[in-house]
Image: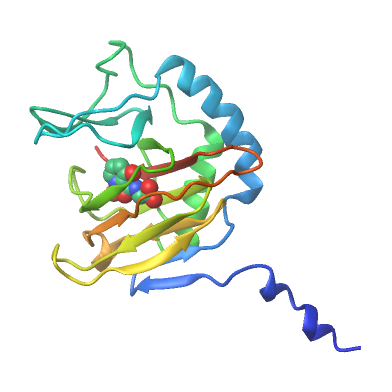
Amino acid sequence: MNLDLFAPEDFAPANVQLGAQAVVLRGLALPYVDAILAELKAIFAAAPLRHMVTPGGFRMSVALTNCGSLGWTTDLSGYRYTQLDPQTGLPWPALPASFVRLAQQAAETAGFPDFLPDACLINRYLPGARMSLHQDKNERDFSAPIVSVSLGIPATFLFGGDQRGDRAQRVPLQHGDVAVWGGQDRLRYHGVSELKDATHPLLGAMRINLTFRRAG
Ligand code: MD6
Ligand code: FE
């Protein structure tokens, strides 16, 4: 019997190298999903998901909140990191230990062994939501990578170049996938195509993205 017909690589999609220092790690977050969902329940109760407004006056289609000592926010006066949630006036919920372990495991696997995140941006995409091409550049120094965890329904990740107009690679991101970009790829433009309608067994018609950063 030729067991190669049933090789595990048929079921575990291959990692995707997006750049010299950028990679999608397929399914790396799957062992953490139960812990993450339990933590998210408490985080959303303390710091509710909300639609923020960009400095240009556009309401973001993605709803977001944060955990960690710093949280990313945007309003009419700009993008920035804050220690307090502007909606509650309280510190953002702490980064759960399981979140830190996942972020460090992903960073190390991608070649960034000393990642110590202090910020986790939590994004909720419903069908129709999208994230236009942008750079993550509000962090104090760019030596730490970005670690981005996908949960729920699939999305198409857009990974462009160092200029907004550079052609973007399109990569499907599934539940449990983790994208990491750093080093010479740290400032690559990236985004998410408009989310198609779908239903995930654990999350329903929703995609959750956790983006870990060293912000301060
Ligand atoms: C993603 N998200 O959802 C990638 N960046 O897979 C981002 O790149 C992102 O959702 C800055 C702010 C919010 C985001
Ligand atoms: Fe981003």
Residue at left offset 42%, top offset 21%: 93
Residue at left offset 29%, top offset 19%: 85
Residue 22 visible somewhere in the drawing: no
Give the image location of residue 43, x and y in percent: 47, 23
Q: Quadrant of residue 118?
A: top left
> Eyeballing the image, is 137 above or below 14?
above
Horizontal relation, residue 1 to residue 84: left or right:
right
Residue at left offset 65%, top offset 67%: 12
Q: Quadrant of the N terminus?
A: bottom right
Horizontal relation, residue 1 to residue 60: left or right:
right
Give the image location of residue 26, x and y in percent: 55, 62
> Eyeballing the image, is 46 above or below 110?
above
Give the image location of residue 128, x and y in percent: 37, 43
- Count of labels in the image: 0
Residue at left offset 21%, top offset 43%: 139
Horizontal relation, residue 28 to residue 148: left or right:
right
Q: Nearer the viewer, residue 183 or 3?
A: 3
> Eyeballing the image, is 72 above or below 90?
below
